[in-house]
Amino acid sequence: MVQALNRIGLRVVLDVVYNHLHASGPNGDDSVLDKIVPGYYLRRNLDGLIENSTCTNNTASEHSMVERLIIDDLLHWAINYKVDGFRFDLMGHLMKRTMVKARSVLQSLTKQNDGVDGSSIYIYGEGWDFAEVANNGRGVNASQFNLCGTEIGSFNDRIRDAMIGGSPFGHPLQQGFITGLSLEPNDHDHGSNSDVEHTLAVSKDHIQVAMAANLKDFVLTNHEGKEVKGSEISMHDGAPLAYASSPIETVNYVSAHDNETLFDIVSLKTPLNISVDARCRMNHLATSVIALSQGIPFFHAGDEILRSKSLDRDSYNSGDWFNRLDFSYNSNNWGIGLPPREKNERHWPLMKTRLADPSFKPGRSHILAALESFCCFISIRYSSPLFRLSTANAIQERVRFHNTGPSWVPGVIVMSIEDGHEGVPGLSQLDPTYSYIVVIINASPNDITFTSPSLRGKSLQLHPIQMNSGDEIVKDSNYDNSSGSFSIPFRTTSVFVEPRPI
């Protein structure tokens, strides 16, 4: 299977779950490792009981033979099955030492000796820091902050929460940058007007840092007008926002297999009275931000076709009925019933209203438009190496954010990426086609105008991929070089490029 996928140009990442065992004890039919050396492979608390914070039977990678088992298994998959990468479930429950050693061993594989180019194997995972391993409680663990400098990727939940609002553990109606916060409020109490405006401005800061690969030393102007590093911006709990030292360490995403799909969370958080057209464009916005950010972009299967699980927030055991993907594009699986009771019952009252309303369900034309939008932004990402800068220095030198400080246009992010010119001192030339790129994300329900003197006098034009797309709205985007003024339609991401002279 891996070989067949490789032959059609796809690489294969294996999802590995080394953080827990299915069973334990000396007698259970499904208990294996605990029968070999009772108690050794499992992490215990001060009372001698097995820790279960991962879900059950936490493993102890701080023990040398647990680490050895993990590394031997990774080598088996890489050498014998030619797997191209590994995604670590609850990676923060493993020790940093284990992950660093795993990466080193995999990277050392060669075509000549092992049949594998280990330098191309990428490893990343969930660097969450909680339960008994929190704050290095069992040794230095593989958490987001601890992995800085290792070139091991971790999921960036900062951009997810800033874009969609709240967190997976907060109120489901809490809005974010692309789901209507301040600009299209729902009925949830988000606080006073000043509180809401402040949250929107802070969310913009968080997204901008993420678009610069969540680099801890990236310098930008924050919503207060101060020049700050990414690590000097604080989260709601006081922890630093940015934690990466290299773009390869940041995996930007807005939805994954856990929690609601992107379409579902947008449908939950937006006002009841907006159209399905509006919700679909919010989906386009979200995927565009991930596609155009520095770092590693991650998309949940079905983000590109408005996939729905009918608001099921934990569908691992919900069967094909809720997990269905329809590649005929006739249905996105919205409204096929209330999701299972176990993880969803608390919010059934909110769900019933939305799932029963036929106006929430997108049609085939919406699904096809989402697919085209997604493909366009992936193509734009690969149209220029400037969207895929490989070092922190390159990002700091070339990426700038405009529309910053206290007088910003609400709901709008403006990012520029500059390239050098061959034979001209300063920046080196990376892109043979474009010398300058401007990305403008307008999450507002209204058309906007943004003017910047620093963007005056350029030869910018809408990216040809967008000009030739089926999205008629984005084609209304305009740039006036005499004033440095941009006109951007509602709920639209517009990409402007400056072609090099032929």
Image: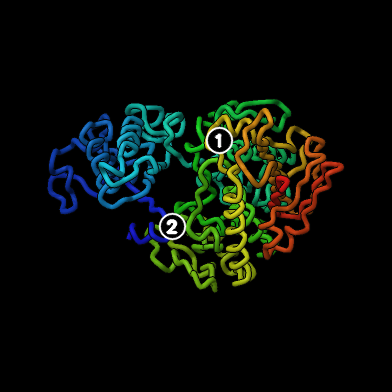
Q: Amino acid at mark 1?
A: Asn
* Relative image position of residue 167 (x, y in whole percent): 54, 44
- Residue at disc 2, secondary structure: loop
Residues marked 2 and 1 touching at CB (< 8 Å)? no
Observer-nearest of 291 and 360: 291
Q: What quarter of the picture does the N terminus occupy? A: bottom left
Q: Residue at x 43, y 62 (%)?
A: 340
Picture quarter containing residue 52?
top left
Observer-nearest of 248 and 356: 248
Observer-nearest of 345 and 65: 65
The answer to whether 280 is drawn above or below residue 206 in the figure is: below
- Residue at disc 1, secondary structure: loop
Q: Amino acid at mark 2?
A: Gly
Q: Residue at x 32, y 28 (%)?
A: 138
Picture quarter containing residue 417?
top right
* Relative image position of residue 316 (x, y in whole percent): 39, 57
Observer-nearest of 391 and 267: 391
The mark tally for this picture is: 2
Label 2 neighbourhood size at 10 Å, few (<14), some (14-19), many (20+)? few
The CA span between labels 2 and 1 is 29 Å
Specify whether residue 185 is in view.
Answer: no
The answer to whether 384 is drawn above or below residue 374 in the figure is: above
* Relative image position of residue 128 (x, y in whole percent): 43, 38
* Relative image position of residue 429 (x, y in whole percent): 63, 37
Q: Residue at x 49, y 42 (%)?
A: 251
Residue marked by disc 1 = 214
Q: Closer to the observer: label 2 or label 1?
A: 2
Residue marked by disc 2 = 9
